Amino acid sequence: MKEEYNVAVLGGGPGGYVAAILAARLGAKVILIEKNKLGGTCLNAGCIPTKALLKCAAVHAGVASAGRYGVEYESVYFDFRKMMEFKNRVVDQLVGGVNQLIKANKIDLIIGEGRIINRQNILVKTPAGNEKINAQNIIVATGAQEVTIPGFEPDGDQVLNSTQILSLQELPRRLTIIGGGVIGVEFASLFNSLGVEVTILELTDRLIPTEDEEISQVLQGFLEKKGVKIQLNILAQSVEKQAEGNLLVRAKPPDGSLQGVNCDKLLVSVGRKACFQNTGLIELGVRIKEDRIVTDEHMQTNISGIYAVGDITLSEQLAHVAYMEARTAVFNIKGETCNADYTAIPHCIYTSPEVAGVGLSEQKARELYGDVKAARFPFYGNGKAIIDGHNEGFVKIVFRDDSQEIVGASIIGTKATELITGVTLAVQKKMKVMDIVNTVYAHPTLSEALGETALAAAGLNLHSV
């Protein structure tokens, strides 16, 4: 390819393909370089396939509990292989859709491994040979991969990472999960709902340590009530393969003793690390901090014309953050000043019940502002939640006592990942409690819980004590 491009994008995940499409729609000549499949981890081995399987599990649970609505079945069962086939169809459809968008926007796509060799050139290694790409601007969006623990290296058979477990063809009888973060609790919820004996081993003193402490405790209670075994403050030491496909995981609690956990499969889910080591950025002298790429508010690195977005930056490793950063980079490349804004980034966990949050947790808000308050509204006071058969959990908003500004929110309960958008707007726009109180919510809807929480914050409780 001899022509010069306005924008070359390295990596075809959420940050990369969004950057490529937006740049093309704004009139740039764009090339997208991806070494595997378009869609990155999110579409192929993360957000989408896991949520597809969780939907399958939710449908099974819904049918199994249909008797409460007067709908009776003689027997209810699930076919795990068909669930996996559904997951694969969803992934294929969405990846195919991204491919069509790339074609429709006349973006040149090259499948190969790209390495930046200087300020405006990328050398791409392909099965057919090497190609040199010349571009005025380069956006790097090469994503992240699973962290591996020494002694627990995945073998693709019994010791699995979060990608490999999505290729199971049969359910294990017992699953142990190292890591009680977002990925760990989602898989725990999924496999538990399908009848698998699940044990979580978490190094810290609570599940999902990045979330609000109250939410972490409540989620732990829900999972344990459903039969998930949870061990906190425990360090996995070793794994040993035994007879008849059995694994013995040894772990050390605070008292220093060794405990053994037997299982058929072991999932290692202790986080993800940025992937940029083979992009040429290090050799170019791009600034690095905490093993991530440092950018300015325009997503530009310390090298003019080279931008970084998504999981390789210092921001949260979330697909929607990558989308926002991709837009920011492209707008600035096209001459429209735009700053990345992390004020109101929603984060969602698709357990049963769901968890979502935005802005500051109650603990973080107290550290920052000192005088803050939190108000709650339980879903058992919401008519739609009762009708839906999911009235567990609550909405919590955190607000400053002096100004009444809403600075954060957490939700645990049905459709929490959908409801969080309403509070995200409130945090983004620095809305106050009475702004929510004076908003009319349709009845009966789950969204009324947001208004009821604001009423509680104002001391005007209507449907809660």
Image: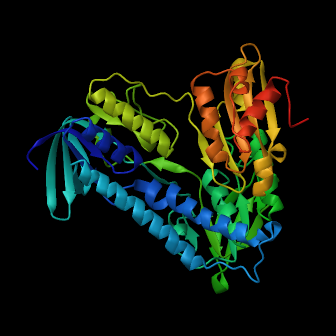
Q: Nearer the viewer, residue 391 or 142?
A: 391
Toward the bottom, the furthest residue is 244
Give the image quarter of residue 26.
top left
**Residue 154 placement (x, y as % from top left):** 52, 67
Left or right, 89 with respect to 267, comes to left
Residue under the point 64% across and 69% down: 239
Picture residue at 66% right of the left edge, 85% below the top? 243
Rendered location of residue 121, percent (x, y):
18, 41
Q: Quadrant of the C terminus?
A: top right
Residue 400 quadrant: top right
Left or right: 425 as drawn, with respect to 304: right
Query: Hey, which residue is sitting farthest top in the picture?
Result: 402
226 or 269: nearer the viewer: 226
Numbered disc total: 0
* Above/below status of 207 relative to 450: below
- Looking at the image, can residue 155 be seen? no
Instruction: Say how the picture is coloured.
Output: rainbow
Report the residue that reaches farthest toward the left.
2
Q: Residue at 34% of width from left, 32% of height from top? A: 329
Q: Measured from the top left, where is residue 244 in percent x and y?
A: 65, 86
Whole-percent x and y of residue 108?
A: 20, 50
Instruction: State the image quarter where residue 58 is shown.
Output: bottom right
- As rendered, which of 178 and 99 lies closer to the eye? 99
Instruction: Please give left or right for residue 228 compared with residue 271 in the image.
Output: right
Looking at the image, can residue 215 be seen?
yes
Looking at the image, the residue that sits furthest to the right is 465
